[in-house]
């Protein structure tokens, strides 16, 4: 600061020196001023300049430390952000995997349930078919035994035994069998000339469900006069009226 103040004075002194003549006192003043200037310059160089260098160096070091710290904080923040992003990605992937696993489990459970249902239905169908086959086998045996019994005791006693066999069944099946037979024989009695009423298609599933599989029905029909005939033995006109072909 002292140097900045003296420089204009020295410049002004040089200008005046070229145009003015100084006295002895003025010379002393100038010399004293120059001496003080030299002392100030020496003091500046010996004390202030090193301090200034140290201050600049300290400021530079502090600035470098600040930038280093800022870089470290930024790096840590970036690393934390990257870690959080990776965690979020892991959570998203884990969620997708869990959702996919749940769908697979649900699909497997559905397939297993469908397979169990299919097996159960197959088992029920097999049991029903086995029961039907056993029932048909029993009816065939009953028909064979009925034919033998009919030949042994005749029609009227055979009808009595057939009704007794029907009575051994539960009330519902017994009533259904009696009502079916009553309707069949009642129709024949009402229109005896209608040959179609005296033909029973024993292979017809409707007849089998209502009468054919009932105990005693076959023996009863044979006892009242129904005979076993093949399709080929029936008159062609009767087959046509029944909607059957002779082939």
Image: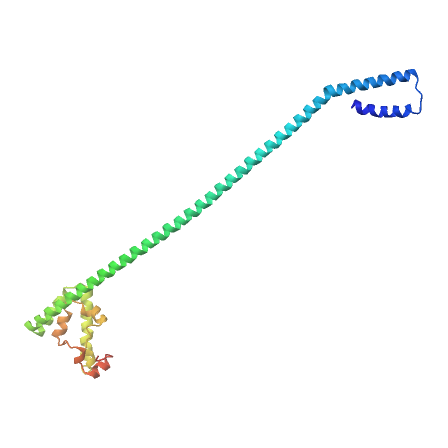
Q: Please name the residue shown 17% across and 64% down the image.
A: 135
Q: Quadrant of residue 21?
A: top right
Q: Quadrant of residue 23?
A: top right
- Closer-to-camera residue (53/240): 53
Q: Please name the residue shown 25% across and 61% down the image.
A: 125
Q: Quadrant of the N terminus?
A: top right
Q: Please name the residue shown 84% across and 18% down the image.
A: 33
Vertical arrangement, residue 224 with respect to residue 117, above or below = below
Vertical arrangement, residue 213 with respect to residue 18, above or below = below
Q: Quadrant of residue 191?
A: bottom left
- Closer-to-camera residue (157/121): 121
Q: Quadrant of the C terminus?
A: bottom left
Query: In this image, 245 relative to 35: left or right?
Result: left
Q: Please name the residue shown 88% across and 16% down the image.
A: 28
- Closer-to-camera residue (198/237): 237
- State the scheme by which the image is colored: rainbow
Query: In this image, 35 relative to 52: left or right?
Result: right
Query: In this image, 237 relative to 149: left or right?
Result: right
- Closer-to-camera residue (140/178): 140
Q: Which residue is farthest front?
A: 18
């Amino acid at each position: 600061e002292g140097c900045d103040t003296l420089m204009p004075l020295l410049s002004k002194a040089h200008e005046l020196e070229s145009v003015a003549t100084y006295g002895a006192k003025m010379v002393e003043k100038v010399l004293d001023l120059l001496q003080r200037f030299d002392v100030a310059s020496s003091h500046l160089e010996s004390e202030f300049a090193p301090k200034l260098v140290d201050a600049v160096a300290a400021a530079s070091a502090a600035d470098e430390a600040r930038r280093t710290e800022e870089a470290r904080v930024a790096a840590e923040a970036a690393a934390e952000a990257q870690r959080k992003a990776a965690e979020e990605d892991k959570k998203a992937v884990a969620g997708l995997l869990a959702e996919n696993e749940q769908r697979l489990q649900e699909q497997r459970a559905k397939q297993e349930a469908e397979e169990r249902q299919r097996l159960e239905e197959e088992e029920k169908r097999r049991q029903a078919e086995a029961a039907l086959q056993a029932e048909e086998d029993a009816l065939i045996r009953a028909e064979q035994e009925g034919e033998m019994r009919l030949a042994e005791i005749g029609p009227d006693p055979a009808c009595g035994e057939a009704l007794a066999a029907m009575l051994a069944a539960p009330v519902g099946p017994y009533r259904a069998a009696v009502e079916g037979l009553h309707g069949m024989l009642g129709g024949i009695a009402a229109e005896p000339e209608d040959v179609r009423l005296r033909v029973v298609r024993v292979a017809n599933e409707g007849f089998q469900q209502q009468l054919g599989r009932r105990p005693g029905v076959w023996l009863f029909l044979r006892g009242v006069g129904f005979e076993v005939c093949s399709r080929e033995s029936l008159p062609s006109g009767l087959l046509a009226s029944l909607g059957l072909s002779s082939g």
